[in-house]
Image: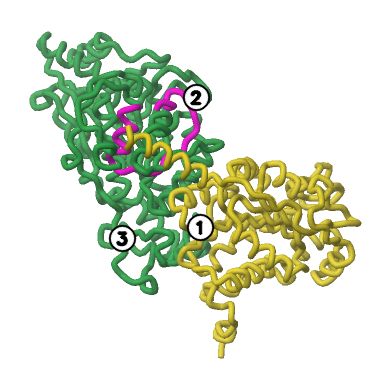
Chain colours: A yellow, B green
Amino acid sequence: MTVIQEFAKHPLAKYLRLERFPHIWCEGCGDGIILNCFVKALDDLGINVDKFVVVSGIGCIGRVAGYIKCDSFHTTHGRPIALATGIKLANPKLTIAVISGDGDLFAIGGNHFIHAARRNVDMTVICSNNFNYGMTGGQFGPTTPLDSYTTTTPYGNIEHPFNLVHLAAAAGAVYVARWTALHVKRLTESIKKALQKKGFKFIEVISPCPEIYGRRNKLGKSIDIMKQYRQISQIRHGYDPAKAEITKEKIIVGEFIDIEKPTYGELLQKQFLKIQKKVMGG
Amino acid sequence: MGEEKRVLTGTHFMNGDVACAEGAIAAGCKFFAGYPITPATEIAERMARRLVEVDGIYVQMEDELASMAAIIGASWAGAKSMTATSGPGFSLMQENIGLAVMTETPCVVVDIMRGAPSTGQPTEGAQQDVMQSKWGSHGDYETIALAPASVQEMFDLTIECFNMSETYRVPTFLLADGFTAHLWERVIIPPPEEIKTVERKKPTVPPDEYMPFKPDDDLVPPMASFGEGYHMHVTGLTHDERGYPKTVDPKTQHELVQRLCEKIRKNAGKIIRTHEFVLEDAEVAVIAYGIPSRASLSAVKGARESGIKAGLLRLVTVWPFPEKQVEELANRVKAIVVPEMNYGQIVREVERAAKETPVHFLAKLGGEPHKPSEIFEVIRRAAEA
């Protein structure tokens, strides 16, 4: 029996394009964990994958769209949210998840992120934050911590990083959470919650990149990074995202924002009915 | 709301941008994403007001990168989709125009050309994006671009853009100059039953047999929509017939790029449209498109009155370039005159097709269209040469 045949017996295998495996990710990468949590969430919710679309951008985690067995779009760099907006508005019956990386969503795609959050377009955005551009060999990005070493910060990073949960909350996301790749059960529950909630939902997942980012910053193997997550992460639901900056000493995780606000689609529908009534009536 | 809202049958006095929007709605456009820009804004304004009446969606995006991405997404969700812009926005759209080419996404991009480079002349018409509409995005590809020369054609050719885009699964451009877009003229909108609309061909096989990028004999693959249970993967990476990335296989790359080009080249005969005026016995042929073709017509008429055997070939289709038509024409005329509102773009294609026949180019920059007398003068000199 081949590895793939063995793999096919896994209860979650039906959500995967098995012919696409093995995946491209390095040993110890957090992206596989995110994929695992994601398909577990689909399974727990009994999601109809015929009406489910995964959209991703460019980067290591960007390949995830090609691994999940549903309609999927692997877009240009930075554009998954803009493209997903078109899909969702043109067919509101579809449930949309955007899964991408910190560089894709917050550097080249930052504008699309804040505007989709502001509009409250109905989609779940999951960001694998590994603090660097892994696919291109480890350059610094918008979340790289100060003083960190990457191939393009050989003397240490002098740029202040984004606090993604603060950014998402300020831009108007109705659900904002952060977990690490260690928090497998909580992350899965968080994804389930987000998928069931209406509006623009954001989940940041702190994800180990032992081969590229970890190696240059002497973070050890993936297991060491996971141990560190366990030591320094603190679960604080309802914590002010503005104060949830990631430091070497502390990673605040949990659900920071969980509010209700009319979605773009709902407001559109309301306006549509009003206009239609006016046109028909008068 | 029914057909009477989709097609505003009747005789109207409207501007080119508005006629374009009405053409789109008549063609079945259900999704418009855009960003305000002169001189294309009136298209967005009209769409914002009108789409809701036909169960369509208007969304104003944060920039043109997003607008182009959104119409691709909407198209895969099954909607006929469109955006409209001008040069600066068209530049930003090139990234995802490439994605639309690679993923074979039907969609229409309207470019109302203004003076350029860069921010240039926002309120002045031009024809400076012709080459950008050919290869503005990176890589080898073929697209379709139509150039209207009247407000009626802003309506008619927008419908044609949708039909061609759906037929060939390629982003299709309405390449209009700012003058034609801002003209006010009579437009006759026919009854719905007289307007030909085309829908993309759908797969006829069940999902487990469907290969989203496996072409039929016409080189165009049938297209399912998201949400229909086909579980398609779509990527801008080089992909096989299943849509899966295959980025280091020379054969896959060669066959894919070849097909993306050939599906347009091999169907060029069906795509290309030109209009001829008194070319039968012409010794000097003017080749024009868009607004200069109107002054060219006057100039040709003037030349005939002066005893010069001049004629006009008007290009309705700019891309794919009507190479055979120009070559055939060049073989039987003494000289060709090409007036363009740029510093020389389509004239290069004309020269290539005309081979030995002399080509006289008449550039016009600055935001003022050619005067018939200016074109007449070049015709006269060409006839005497």
Name the element at disc 3: loop
Q: Amino acid at mark 2?
A: Pro
The residue labelled by disc 2 is: B117
Asked if the magenta segment contains residue B181, the reply would be no
Query: Residue at horizontal 37%, vertical 44%?
Result: B55
Residue reaching furthest right? A249
Q: Which residues are magenta?
A: B18-42
Where the N terminus of chain B falls, by quadrant?
top left
Residues at discs 3 and 2 in contact (Cβ within 8 Å): no
How busy is the neighbourhood of tag 3: few (under 14 within 10 Å), some, or many (20 plus)? few
What residue does disc 3 label?
Answer: B202
Mark earlier in primary sequence (3, 2): 2
The quadrant holding residue A223 is bottom right
Q: Residue A73 — which label?
A: 1
Q: Where is residue A204, by image quadrant? A: bottom right
User: Can residue A109 be seen here?
Assistant: no
Q: Is residue B170 visible?
A: yes
How far across and how far down the image is residue B154, in percent? 29, 29
Label 1 amino acid?
A: Phe
Q: Which residue is at a point 47% across and 42% down the rendered structure image?
A: A270
